[in-house]
Image: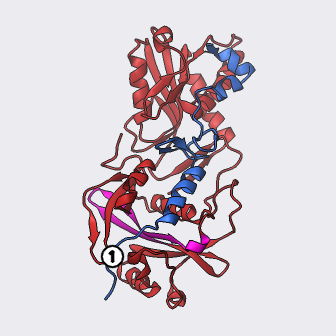
Chain colours: A blue, B red
Amino acid sequence: MPIYLADVLKNPDVLRHPATEHKCCTCGVPLQETITGKRKTSGGFACSDCYYELLGREVEERPLSSGGVRRG
Amino acid sequence: MKTIFIGREEVHAYLADLAHRLEPVPSLWCPITHSGREIAVHIAQEVEKVAKAKGESVPNVRILPIEIDDQHQPVFEERPEDVIPYQSVLLLDGAIHSGMTMARCAAAVLKHRPSSVASYSVVLKRRSVFIPTLWGVMTDETDRAHFLLNKIPNNRLNAGAKSSQPHVHLRRLDESRSKAPTIKCDVPSIDRVTWGDRLWEMATSDGATTTYLLERSETVVGFLTLHVEDRGAARVMTVLEVAVDPSEKDKGYGGLLLRFADTMARQAECDAVRLNAIEEKVPMYEKFGYHRVAGSLVLPLEDERYYPMERRVLYHHPDLRG
C-alpha cells in the first residue's frame, strides 16, 4: 500500500511502524540504535540488553583469561 | 566522547530550514530505517507549514521506506523499479555513522533512474564516507547523539528493566584489596593470579591496564581487567580477564562487566575490543560479532590455547570498515 505525505500528516503511525521494522531476535523490542542498541548476532539483530545477557552467560560459564605470565 | 542531546525544538529548527530549502519538494522520500522514518514524520510537518504559509496545498509526495537487512543491504518496502524512475528522490536518515548505509541506499536508488537524489541526516559523523546534501550536526567519531527524545538512556551496571539483578558497583582494584581472597573459577590461568599480581600489572603498565572489582555491598562477585594500547593506526582495548564467582552465576554479572568494557572502550576512543577466546569458544564469540585476528597464544602449563578475537567499537576501524 503506497504511503503519501498526506497520509503521514493524518496519522504518523503509518510510517512509524512498518511490518519490516527490525525487532530484537530475543525479546522483540523494536530496535533503535541509540536507544535499545542494535547488535548483530548469529540469530539476527538483538538489543543491547539481550546481547549482553546472552554473552554474559557464556562468560560466566567460561571466564575470559589473558593467559599472560604475571610477575615472578 | 561527548553525549549530544538535540532537543525537539532544535531538531524542528533544522527541519524547518530543510523544508525551506527543498524547493521544489522532492517527489519521493526514502526514509532509512526507524530514525529515517521518524525524521520523515517531522519533516512532513515542516513542509506542511511552509505550504500553508504560501497558501498552497501539501505537495504530492510519495514515501518509500528502506530497511537494512542482515547483510547490510537496502530493502525497499515496494518494488523500487515501479516507484523510483524519473522521481526526484530525498534520502532521509536520523544519523549517519560510517556512511556506508547511506552510500548503499544511494547506489540502490540510482540504479532505478531517478531524476535526482538529495540526501539529509540530522547527525553526521566526521569520518563518514558519505556526506549528504544537507545535514544538521556534525559530531566526532566517539560522540553519542540523541534527538527527539524525552529521556536519554543512562550508562548502567544492571541488566535492564527485565532483570531483577541485585544492585552492584565497580571499584578499581587498590592496595586495600590486595590480600583479599581471589575469585576461583576453575580456569588455571586465572586462578593462579592474585590481586597483588594484578596490582603490580596496573602499577607497571603506565595506566594501560586496570582491574575493576564488581562488588555487591562489600562482597566481590566478579572482576574485569582491561588493557588499552595503540596498534598501528588503531587503538584497541583488550579485555584481559572477566570472571564471575561461580556461586554468583545467572544474575547477569558477566553481561554487565562486558557492557562496562564496551563503554570504557568507547570512552577511550578505541576502534575495537579484543579478547582472547579459548579454542572451543571461538565459534561462540563469532556468533556475537567477534572475528579472529592473526596469532594464537598457547599456555603449555595450563594446557590452554587462546585465539585473539576482535569486534569493532567505532565504525572506522581500519580493518573492519564496511
Instruction: Please tell me which residue is depicted at 60% across the width and 29% down the height of the picture.
Output: B37
| Magenta stretch prevailing secondary structure | strand
B240 magenta-colored? yes
**Image quarter of residue B105:** top left
Check the image and report above or below for B77 versus A51.
above
Query: In the depicted view, which residue is nearer to us: B201 or B252?
Result: B252
Q: Which residues are magenta?
A: B224-248
Residue B234 percent across, percent down from the top left: 32, 57
Residue at 34%, 82% (x, y): give it: A70
Does the rendering let one see residue A7? yes
Query: Residue B247 vs residue B278: left or right?
Result: right
Measured from the top left, where is residue B181 in percent x and y?
Answer: 53, 87
Residue with the mark numbered 1: B302
Instruction: State yes or no: residue B121 in magenta.
Output: no
Image quarter for residue B19?
top right
Spot occupied by residue A69 in the image (x, y as percentages of width and height): 31, 79
What chain does mark 1 sit on? Answer: B
Quadrant location of the C terminus of chain B in the rendered image: top left
A69 vs B225, nearest the viewer: A69
Residue B4, x across and y down, in percent: 58, 50
Taking the spot 53% from the left edge, 16% from the top edge, the residue there is B78
Report whether B275 appears left or right of B170.
Answer: left
Name above or below for residue A2 compared with residue A20.
Answer: above
Identity of the amino acid at label 1? Glu
Does residue B131 show up? no
| B134 to the left or right of A21 | left
